[in-house]
Amino acid sequence: MAEFFAMGGYAGYVWSAYGVTAIVIIALVLVTGLDLIAQRKQLDVLESDGARKRAPARPSGSKL
Amino acid sequence: MNPMSHLTLTQRFHAFANPARFMALSDKLIAPFGFVTALLIGAGLWYALFNSPADYQQGESVRIMYVHVPSAWLGMMGYMIMAGASLVALVFRHPLADVCAKSAAPIGAAFCFLALVTGSLWGKPMWGTWWEWDARLTSMLILLFLYLGYIALWSTIEEPQRAGRAAAILALVGSINVPIVHYSVVWWNTLHQPASVFRADGPTIASSMLVPLLLMALGFTLFFMTLLMVRMRAEILRRRVRALQLALSEV
């Protein structure tokens, strides 16, 4: 096992390369996922706002 | 009967590329694509780290290749997707093409960056230097700057239609760099080695190394596609938010 991690003396280079790749890929997924959730939330808020503005006469609490 | 059969080819293309249809289609595709991506990268890593030989000259450092080469391919493929979608956006004024180009840029930029960093980590032990101003390395750095310029252009112009057009023109002008990256190792005397997979006379790399390389490359490509779909969904929602905000401010 120790031999595997030593990578024939190139451990620093090999594991750094795999490490930075993993970090960048995970960061891409996180940033993208969080953006999608944020946009969906904002759209939900705006859509319910719009619904209220278009139908001001309805009693509060009624859903369109 | 196919409901689209009465349409002309162009109309069909537009119907298919309709954002609502894209939302429905991508909703079904993202999970299976993500699953296959995980399988391919899992298998690729197993071969890359445990089940492939050390190189007779480079020793274990050759394992950097399995993340470096797919990253470089995708850095270039991402640019081609971005430039292709930009062309469609300019010519057909199709909003989905515009969304695609904008969404592909950060993913391509990330892979381009990874190609440069992992290449540097490979270059130090093998060439004795982190960086060299050789044609391949320099053209790849220019590719990264083109991506960053494209992304910056989108964020500096407020109005999406104008931003999209300016960015599309930059993407198309910059696409001249993609063949330069590819042929740099042929046209100039570079420290970087020439191609050993995409060659006219077939791959010259041993199959024990080609298997992990192709698995990783396929996994990275599917990852790119999956993430591109998610980013495009977020971008479509962002445009709906913007349109609603404008509409509400006028009420």
Image: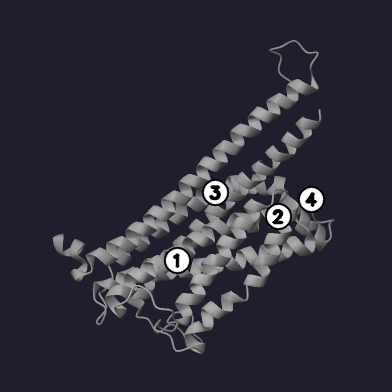
Whether residues under marks 4 and 3 lie with C-beta atoms below 8 angstroms apart, the answer is no
Q: CA distance from mark 4 to mark 3?
A: 25 Å
Residue at mark 4: B3
Whether residues under marks 2 and 1 lie with C-beta atoms below 8 angstroms apart, the answer is no
SS at mark 1? helix
Q: CA distance from mark 2 to mark 4?
A: 36 Å
First reached walking from the N terminus: tag 1 or tag 4: 4
Number of the front mark, 2 or 1: 2
Q: Which chain contains the residue that carries disc 4?
A: B
The crowding category of the residue bearing disc 4, from other C-alpha atoms within 10 Å (few below 14, some 14 to 19, many at least 20), is: few
Q: Is residue B11 left or right of residue B214?
A: right
Name which residue lies at 25% across and 72% down: B60
First reached walking from the N terminus: tag 2 or tag 4: 4
Q: Is residue B198 left or right of residue B27?
A: left
Q: Give percent across and percent down for residue B210.
A: 38, 75
Q: Which chain contains the residue that carries disc 2?
A: B
Residue at mark 1: B71
Question: Looking at numbered disc 2 in the image, what kind of residue is underneath it?
Answer: Ala
SS at mark 4? loop
Name which residue lies at 64% across and 30% down: A44
Name which residue lies at 65% across and 42% down: B238
Count the marks. Answer: 4
Q: Is residue B138 left or right of residue A14?
A: right
SS at mark 3? helix
Q: CA distance from mark 1 to mark 3?
A: 21 Å
Residue at mark 3: B30
Question: Looking at numbered disc 4 in the image, what kind of residue is underneath it?
Answer: Pro
Q: Give percent across and percent down for residue B152.
A: 60, 56
Q: Is residue B161 left or right of residue B175?
A: right
Say if residue B212 shows up in the picture.
no
Q: CA distance from mark 1 to mark 4?
A: 41 Å
